[in-house]
Amino acid sequence: MIILENTLDTLIPSLVDIVEKAGKLISDIYNDEFEVIKKEDGSPVTKADTLSHDLLKAELERLTPGVPVISEEDESSWIVKSPQYWLVDPLDGTKGFIYKTGDFCINIALMENDKPIFGLIHLPLTRETYYGFNGKAFRNLAGDLSPIHTRHFPANGLTLLLGGYGKKFKEQEDFFLKTYPITKIMRLRSAIKFCLIASGSADIYMRFEPCYEWDTAAGHALLEAAGGILTQVNGSPFLYGKTHLINEAFVAFGQKP
């Protein structure tokens, strides 16, 4: 099965239903007791990650047979090569989930020739779903659909979004603080940051610490559909299909700087 960009509209209701089911599962676990397990690389994982993965993989394969699903929680899937594939993070922001900050989400991107052409981010606690493709982006809240767009840079200063790694990259942060008229800094975990820029609530998101392609692909597609851009820190294009699926530093803007 090949998913054409102009037929994505017909898949969206089913995709929203799928992530709402996974989000309900995650929320139920979040509000209960759960065990935290360490992966081989030292990162944490919970049953919310694995059960969300199981549900999303099964439902996506049922909805779009023949389109492979690459998921953070299935290392055997990482070597799949196909013109089209789903790139999934079943629970982005596991530390936010564990520490009960609320900063976690589900990421689903449709990749074509290693480029994100559709991105969907679901926030389980608020039941918001953001998605974008082909120059249009939306926020779905319990069936109430609203178009979203990035904002022009405010005259009174920009809002900068950063991760939760403290002062580890202070030198790089200071450089950007001197380069742009930043008046507000927010630190958040997960791809929720892309939703804030895409919907016009923030202006810049910078990440200096490596992450994986499933951490950015959905947000990248959403951001571009809403009018923003994402590049490497030096301004060169941000690429996918890399060895081990690892991203280096990047910067996302609501408008071209």
Image (cartoon, grey):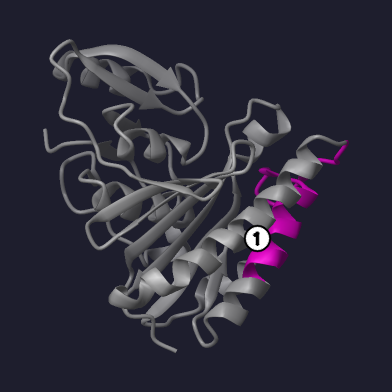
Q: Which stretch is magenta?
A: 33-57
Q: Position of residue 60 (x, y in %)?
A: 58, 73
Number of labels in the image equals 1
For the point 85% across and 41% down, the residue is 35
For the point 69% across and 57% down, the residue is 52
Q: Is residue 176 above or below residue 75?
A: above
49 sits to left or right of 144: right
Comparing 110 with 11, the one in front is: 11
For the point 37% across and 34% down, the residue is 208
Q: Is residue 195 above or below residue 121?
A: above
163 sits to left or right of 220: right
Residue marked by disc 1 = 73
Q: Which quadrant of the structure image shows residue 186?
A: top left
Mark 1 is surrounded, within 10 Å at the Cα level, by few (under 14), some (14 to 19) or many (20 or more) other residues, namely some
Q: Secondary structure at mark 1?
A: loop
Comparing 142 with 2, the one in front is: 142
Q: Residue furthest right?
A: 33
Q: Position of residue 212 (x, y in %)?
A: 47, 52
Residue 59 seen: yes
